[in-house]
């Protein structure tokens, strides 16, 4: 995603709304659309396990859990790295769809 657009994507149980996480304006639009206050977290959908370590601090226990349960219908919470824009709070959730 390169524009401040909002997309609709399917999950195992509901449809989700998504934006480019590096566009603060798009993130603000998402919060407004959902009627959410800024301190309530939203999910961050990533395409691969490798992306988690780019955007989050992952310890050995988390790596074992990731290897066992992802990809699949699971949410995981991590502290973000400095690569993540400051518009995000210090904790975000990553979700992996099971696209088999």
Image (spheres, grey):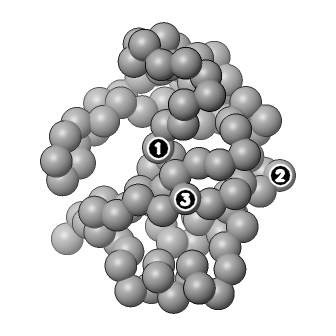
Checking the image for residue 51, the label placed there is: none
Q: Position of residue 29 (x, y in %)?
A: 52, 14
Between marks 3 and 2 in the image, the one whose residue lies nearer the viewer: 3
Q: Nearer the viewer, residue 13 or 52?
A: 13
* Residue 1 in sight here: no
Q: Position of residue 25 (x, y in %)?
A: 63, 17
Check disc 1 and report its element: helix, strand or loop.
Answer: strand
> How many angstroms separate mark 1 from mark 2 (CA)?
18 Å
Residue at 54 percent of width and 37 percent of height: 41
Check disc 3 and report its element: helix, strand or loop.
Answer: strand
The numbered mark, 3 or 2, whose residue comes first in the sequence reads 3
- Whether 1 is drawn above or below 51: the answer is above
Q: Position of residue 70 (x, y in %)?
A: 38, 74
Residue at 47 percent of width and 19 percent of height: 36
> How many angstroms separate mark 1 from mark 3 (CA)?
9 Å
Query: Does 16 sit left or right of 91 as displayed?
Result: left
Residue at 77 percent of width and 56 percent of height: 81
Residue under label 3: 77
The numbered mark, 1 or 2, whose residue comes first in the sequence reads 1
Query: Does 98 sit left or right of 65 as displayed?
Result: left
Between marks 1 and 3 in the image, the one whose residue lies nearer the viewer: 3
> How many angstroms separate mark 3 from mark 2 (CA)?
16 Å
Checking the image for residue 82, the label placed there is: 2
Residue under label 1: 43
Contact check, label 1 and label 2, Cβ < 8 Å: no
């Amino acid at each position: 995603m390169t524009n401040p657009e909002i997309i609709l994507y399917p999950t195992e149980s509901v449809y989700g709304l998504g934006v480019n996480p590096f566009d603060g304006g798009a993130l603000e639009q998402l919060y407004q659309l959902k009627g959410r206050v800024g301190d309530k977290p939203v999910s961050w959908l990533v395409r691969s396990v490798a992306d988690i370590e780019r955007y989050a601090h992952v310890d050995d226990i988390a790596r074992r859990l990731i290897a066992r349960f992802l990809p699949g219908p699971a949410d995981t919470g991590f502290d973000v790295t400095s690569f993540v824009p400051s518009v995000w709070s210090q904790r975000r959730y990553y979700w992996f769809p099971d696209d088999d």
